[in-house]
Amino acid sequence: MPTELDTRMMARALQLARRGQYSAMPNPHVGCVLVRDGQVIGEGFTRPAGGNHAEIEALQAAGDAQGATAYVTLEPCSHTGKTGPCADALVAAGVSRVVVAMEDPNPQVAGAGLAKLRAAGLQVEVGLLAADAGRVIPGFIARMSRGRGRVRAKLAMSLDGRTAMASGESQWITGPAARADVQRLRAMSCALVTGIGTILADDCSLTVRAGELDLPPAEAALASQKQPLRVVLDSRLQTPPGAKVLDRSAPTLLCRDAALPASTDIAAAGAEQLALQRGAAGLDLAALLAELGARQSNEILVECGPRLAGAFLQAGLLDEIIVYMAPVLMGSAARPLLELPLERMADKVPLAIADMRRVGEDWRITAIPRYRG
């Protein structure tokens, strides 16, 4: 049975893991705490891709880890990628006991790290605060288990469920605190998906801006160090060459109808182009998410208008809907939250409310669709 110290140290490791949520991708953000004689001797969390994993950071902080217990939120890796195996590093450092929250769902690891530790004679325990550890890296778990990361749609609406005036005017429904919260959602995302309608209406840049994150300076700098991939669904190649989304401040993937040739103007602007099949409902969204999964996108944030958001929902591809609700009324002529033509009560989409909290003067509601079948 875990001791009170075990639980406390693993909780601390989970706190550390969250510090990598804006920068560790595509790796899972992991935390590690080294303890000897009841005292913490080293801590660490996963650094940006190519940098140290959490275990290495903690070992370097400790200096001498002989006889220590390592508390790690995810199974230490056993393979060599951009860095060496963390399981080997723990063995070499003389760690005697390793407490792991959850086994790594990555098929390249999947218990091999635990087996390596046990084979070296270390005491290994798995499962302490496992559910909490899973909630820290849901996108990574989703990508490893089904081939695509967690997909969340971000929407802003008035109290009467409207997202823009009939003219298309939509800035700003919510206040600065909510907009800073959206910046943090962007920062923890690997890819931001929008539609050509949003680009033509708002000419948005879809970037993470350090000054708008409302985070401590060092954390904000880390969060904005690597920009998410900007993905624009533009079946007919309508993106203007001077659009902000093509400004090279972040990578851009423009998705077009496979029946059309690539745009030389878009290519000249530096954006990559992806050909997708087009059906009655638009471009193949499932194929897009499969492509993003292959590109190691753990967290995918959909920021778009009601039509594309409705298409993702109708296709059963949204894991979460995050709605920022402002205490204003925009009237019956304004545009709805989703383009979702339902005619019968039996067709309504049930949702599970996972979270509701105040953000400045607005409310953020996180809902999970309950898809039928």
Image (spheres, rainbow, N blue to C red):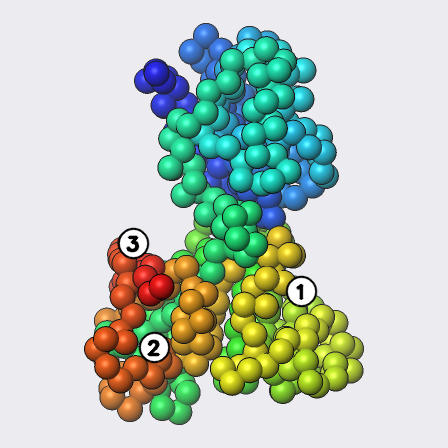
Q: Earlier in the sequence, mark 2 or mark 3?
A: 2
Residue named by callout 2: 337
Where is residue 166, by image quadrant?
bottom left
**Which of the two residues, 199 or 369, is positioned nearer the viewer here?**
369
Mark 1: few, some, or many residues within 10 Å (few <14, many ≥20)? some
The residue sitting at 35% across, 80% down in the picture is: 340
Where is residue 360, by image quadrant?
bottom left
Q: Amino acid at mark 1?
A: Pro
Q: Give the Cα separation between the discs numbered 3 and 1.
A: 32 Å
Q: Residue furthest front?
A: 373
Looking at the rendering, in which quadrant would you find the C terminus? Answer: bottom left
Q: Amino acid at mark 2?
A: Leu
Q: Earlier in the sequence, mark 3 or mark 1?
A: 1
Q: Amino acid at mark 3?
A: Ala
Residue 7 appearing in the image? yes
Looking at the rendering, in which quadrant would you find the N terminus? Answer: top left
Where is residue 191, by image quadrant?
bottom right
Q: Give the Cα separation between the discs numbered 2 and 1.
A: 28 Å
Q: Are marks 2 and 1 in contact (CB under 8 Å)?
A: no
Residue named by callout 3: 354
Query: Circle 3 sits in a helix, a strand or a loop, which is it?
Result: strand
Figure check: 222 above or below 103? below
Q: Give the Cα separation between the discs numbered 2 and 3.
A: 19 Å
Q: Are marks 2 and 3 in contact (CB under 8 Å)?
A: no
Mark 3: few, some, or many residues within 10 Å (few <14, many ≥20)? few
